[in-house]
Image: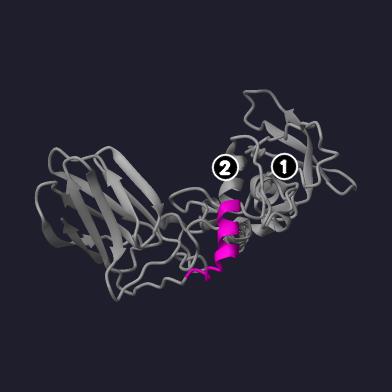
Amino acid sequence: MLYTKAGNDNYVVFDRNDKVGGYCWITAANTHSKLQTEFGSFHIWWGQDLVTEKCPYPKGWEIWPKKKEVLAHFQHAAEAYGVLPNFRFKTNVAKMDIIGEKEDHDRYYRLTVAPVDGGDSAEVSVSSLFNYPGCMTRNRIIDYPGEDEFGGHVAYGMNDDCPYEELKGNNVAILGNGAFAVENAASLADGLATQQAGRSPPETFHFPEVCKLSVVVESGRRAGMELKVEAVEGFSLPNNCFIGVRVGDVLKQGRYEPHRCYHFPQLERRRNAKVDIYQHVGTCIVAVDPDTKSSHEVAVTSMDPSLPGSRIRVNVE
C-alpha cells in the first residue's frame, strides 16, 4: 500500500484466493476468530504514513474484530489505496525460471502462472519477488476410538469445520492446548454467556465526547494493593474497551469492567502506575504512594492526533 501510495504501479500480485485476506483469515480462521493483538495493526490505519483522504483515521472499528470484520478491513484498504487493479486472483504460480547469470545486470525471473480453476497458463517476467506462503498449517488427523458410536459432533476448531450453532446448551470438550484450542474455549464461553444472559450489544463510543475515569487505589501492608479503573458519574466507556495497568514490573490487562479491581503486590516505595486505555482514548502515568491518600487529575494523551486529550481523576486511598 505504501508503494502504491508513493505513486508506483509496476507490480503484480498473484493470489490463489478470490479476494484479499490470505490463507490465515480466509481459510484458517473460523467465524468466531478474533484479532488477538493489543494494538490494532490489522486495522486500516496504523501510522501517519498510511493516512490518505480515502483512508483516514479509522473511527468506529472494533479493537478485536472477528473474521468477517477483519476481511472487510482488508477489502476496504485494498479499494481505498487502489491496489486491486494489480491483483490477479485465483491464480497459481506453478513454476519459476531464473534467466541470466547471477552477476548479470539484466537477470530476471520468468514465472509460469495458471488459473486455479483450469485454463491456459501464461508467462510473466519480473525483476524481484516477495513470497508470502501463509501459515503452512496442516491439521493432524486423529481417529479416536468410539467416534462412530458417539452421538455428538467431532470436529476441528480450525477453519469453519465446527458447527458452532449446534453447540449451544451442550457440554463441549476441547482437546489440545494450541492457539485454536484456546481461541475456541474463549469463543464458546463468550457465546454461551451472551446467549444465556441475553446481553445487549455493546454501546457505541464516540469521540470527542470527554471521557473521565476514576482510578482508585486501596492499599494495605498485608493484602497488597487494589487498583480500580472506572468511569466517573456522567461519563461512559465502551463495553469492549481494553485496559492495561502496569505498576513496576507487574502488568494487568483485560476488558473494561466497571467493578473490576486489579490486584498488585504491596509497594515498598512510591512508584508510577501506567494506565493504558485502548479504543482511541489514550494513556497516562499515575503516581502511586502506598502510604499517602490523595486525589488529583491526570492528563490523558489521545491516541488520535486530530483529537484533544482527556483527563482522568485519580484517587489513592
Q: Is 50 within the magenta?
A: no
* Percent of width and height locating residue 100: 71, 27
Q: Residues within 10 Å of mark 1 (few under 14, many from 20)?
A: some
Give the Cα separation between the discs numbered 2 and 1. 13 Å
Give left or right: position of 26 versus 255: right
Residue 10: which disc?
none
Q: Secondary structure at mark 2?
A: helix
* Percent of width and height locating residue 267: 18, 40
Residue 156: which disc?
1
Which span of residues is magenta-colored? Answer: 188-202
Label 2 vs 1, first from the N-terminus = 1
What residue is shown with label 2?
182
Q: Residue at x 35, y 56 (%)?
A: 260
Give 152 or 91, whichever is nearer the viewer.
152
Give left or right: position of 95 versus 53: right
Using the rendered view, name the quadrant where residue 141 is placed.
top right
Give 39 or 226, whichever is nearer the viewer.
226
What kind of residue is marked 1?
A: Tyr
What kind of residue is marked 2?
A: Val
Q: Which residue is at the far right?
A: 119
* Percent of width and height locating residue 202: 49, 68
Q: Secondary structure at mark 1?
A: loop
Q: Which residue is at the far left?
A: 292
In the image, residue 140 above or below residue 126 = above
Q: Residue at x 45, y 55 (%)?
A: 46
Give left or right: position of 226 versus 221: right
The number of numbered badges drawn on the structure is 2
Colouring method of the image: one colour
